[in-house]
Image (cartoon, rainbow, N blue to C red):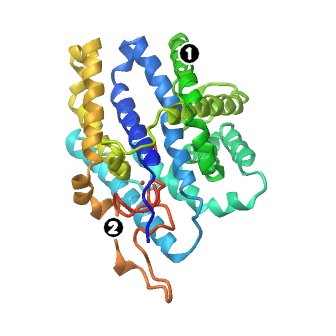
């Protein structure tokens, strides 16, 4: 028997993925507007941490049981292979780039999140076994920022630098989310966000936005080595504060978009094709899009597009790539069997789900 999905987590995932899409749509425009660049900085400070924390929270039950390993492979590894192949081929076709290589070792654009989620989830039993998992994960992230020799394979810098948010999710309990959703937290979040926007507006001329992407060591950003660990701590604190404020305003009741929370992985992976097509085809080069009204229009279109891509009909069309059953590839497990989407393990975006109405509550970028 399945429990009712928790509307709060579905709402949070949908709203977070909308912010991800809006941030990607703002990127080609932000250089012409200091206000837009400030908003972009604030959004990028918390939108992926908010999604990753939820992914960690719903990975708490992960172990190496066969049915859970199967879901990890079919819900994370297989979509990674498919989309890591599809994005470069899409660039070849749309951008007329015949020399664009396909490499499963170098995550391209949005696929880094699937690679990271696969690694994070495999290490879940380790973080649940150690005595102080969060400080240890932060230490790993700090060491990564001073280790440029890690290289770009599997985007390990991002895997390691975003790791603390996933581990934090593993450590959280339902009461922690209830605390940040209290009325006083909603009230306090307003001046916090206003202050964050003001600080971002002041800081953007001298701020390297690459720090927000967590994909480079300090030395690769032409910064002194010690700045890497410092920025890990500063950004972790800022991201947690803004994420808590974001959660405070997420509705806890069912809304018109609640069911879309089960399709966030679909919206996440597919909206990248729309954004990249716009970049390749020069859609963002039109001068009127760089005006205030144009920026508003792009924002609305990005939100509408990712909303459409999260809908059940789109999910059904792309289920072969995002949620393949692949019964032919796995042996049965005597006495237990494989359950495709049960109430005992998270799906690809970090939720326990069985379509839109089952237990649990489907994430980066």
Residue beneath label 2, please? Answer: 324
Point out the residue furthest to the bottom here. Answer: 334
Q: Is residue 51 above or below residue 213?
A: below
For mark 1, give the secondary structure: helix
Residue 76: quarter of image: bottom left
Residue 245: quarter of image: top right
Locate the N terminus and report the quarter of the image it occupies. Answer: bottom left
**Residue 93, position as x, y percentages in the image:** 21, 45
Residue at left 37%, top 32%?
Answer: 24
Question: Does residue 209 appear in the picture of this structure?
Answer: yes
Residue at left 34%, top 54%?
Answer: 83
**Residue 300, position as x, y percentages in the image:** 27, 27
Q: Is residue 361 above or below residue 275?
A: below
Label 2 Cα neighbours within 10 Å, binned few <14 / some 14-19 / many ≥20: some
User: Nearest the camera: 207 or 44?
Assistant: 44
Residue at left 24%, top 22%?
Answer: 297
**Residue 134, position as x, y percentages in the image:** 71, 47
Locate the C terminus and report the quarter of the image it occupies. Answer: top left
| Mark 1 or mark 2: whose residue is earlier in sequence | 1
Q: Is residue 47 above or below residue 123?
A: above
Residue beneath label 1, please? Answer: 195
User: Nearest the camera: 234 or 206?
Assistant: 234
Mark 1–mark 2 Cα distance, whole angstroms, equals 45 Å
User: Nearest the camera: 65 or 290?
Assistant: 65
Instruction: Name the front one of labels 1 and 2.
Output: 1
């Amino acid at each position: 028997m399945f429990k009712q999905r928790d509307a709060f987590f579905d709402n949070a995932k949908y709203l977070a993925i909308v912010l991800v899409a809006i941030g990607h749509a703002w990127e080609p425009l932000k250089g012409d507007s200091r206000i837009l660049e400030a908003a972009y900085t604030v959004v990028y400070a918390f939108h992926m941490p908010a999604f990753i924390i939820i992914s960690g929270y719903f990975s708490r039950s992960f172990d190496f049981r066969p049915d859970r390993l199967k879901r990890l492979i079919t819900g994370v590894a297989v979509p990674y292979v498919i989309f890591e192949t599809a994005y470069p081929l899409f660039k070849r076709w749309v951008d007329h780039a015949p020399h664009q290589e396909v490499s499963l070792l170098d995550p391209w654009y949005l696929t880094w999140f699937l690679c990271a989620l696969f690694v994070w989830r495999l290490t879940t039993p380790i973080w649940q076994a150690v005595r102080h998992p969060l400080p240890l994960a932060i230490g790993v992230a700090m060491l990564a920022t001073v280790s440029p020799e890690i290289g770009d394979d599997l985007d390990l810098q991002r895997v390691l630098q975003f790791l603390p948010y996933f581990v934090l999710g593993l450590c959280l309990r339902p009461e922690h989310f209830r605390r940040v959703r209290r009325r006083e937290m909603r009230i306090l979040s307003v001046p916090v966000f206003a202050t964050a926007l003001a600080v971002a507006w002041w800081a953007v001329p001298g701020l390297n936005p690459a720090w927000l992407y967590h994909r480079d060591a300090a030395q690769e950003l032409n910064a002194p080595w010690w700045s890497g660990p410092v920025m890990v701590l500063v950004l972790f604190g800022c991201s947690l504060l803004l994420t808590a404020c974001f959660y405070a305003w997420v509705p806890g009741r069912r809304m018109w978009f609640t069911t879309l929370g089960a399709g966030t992985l679909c919206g996440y992976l597919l909206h990248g094709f729309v954004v990249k097509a716009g970049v390749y085809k020069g859609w963002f080069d039109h001068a009127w899009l760089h005006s205030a009204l144009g920026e508003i229009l792009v924002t609305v279109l990005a939100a509408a597009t990712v909303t459409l891509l999260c809908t059940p009909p789109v999910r059904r069309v792309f289920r072969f790539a995002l949620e393949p059953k692949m019964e032919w590839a796995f042996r049965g497990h005597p006495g237990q069997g494989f359950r495709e989407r049960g109430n005992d393990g998270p799906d690809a975006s970090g939720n326990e789900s069985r379509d839109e109405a089952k237990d649990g509550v489907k994430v980066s970028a």
